[in-house]
Amino acid sequence: MVKDLSGLEITSDSSAVVDAINSFVDQLLSVGNDAQVIFKGIEADPACAIANAQVAAFYLFAGGSVALTQAKLYLNVAKSYLKTANAREKLYVAAIEAWANRDIAQAIASW
């Protein structure tokens, strides 16, 4: 199991997915213009639940009904891999799913 820059475990053996996750978080926190880097994570490890949830978050940040549809597609993929995810990743997926369902209180509680 690998860890991100914060020292948190990522359920993947791919350093490329961790690099993409680290870059995505950096882009979000710095309001950067390369948040789509998270798609490289999906390419590196399509079965990484948290990377799929982060792609869903990418779409949710975009807003709109088309983005919501895309987000839910990636959330469904993320949920299909929860059996191999760690506890933090499961909470992350739950938070993004609650956000997609516009249940902000639950999203915050899961976060």
Image (cartoon, rainbow, N blue to C red):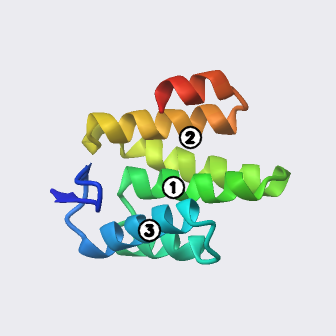
- As drawn, 70 above or below 76: below
Q: Amino acid at mark 3?
A: Ile
In the picture of the structure, the residue carrying the numbered disc 2 is 96
**The residue tagged with tag 1: helix, strand or loop?**
helix
Tag 3 near tag 2, CB within 8 Å: no
Rendered image quadrant of residue 92:
top left
Q: Position of residue 68 (x, y in %)?
A: 74, 49
Tag 1 near tag 2, CB within 8 Å: yes
Question: Which residue is nearer to you in this view: 31 or 21?
Answer: 31
Q: Position of residue 23 (x, y in %)?
A: 44, 71
In the picture of the structure, the residue carrying the numbered disc 3 is 42
- As drawn, 38 above or below 105: below
Residue at mark 1 to residue at mark 2: CA–CA distance:
8 Å
Rendered image quadrant of residue 34:
bottom right
Residue at mark 3 to residue at mark 2: CA–CA distance:
17 Å
Residue 54 - label? 1
- As drawn, 111 above or below 64: above
Tell me: 10 left or right of 105. left
For image coordinates 22% across by 58% down, the residue present is 3
Residue 66 - label? none
**The residue tagged with tag 2: helix, strand or loop?**
helix
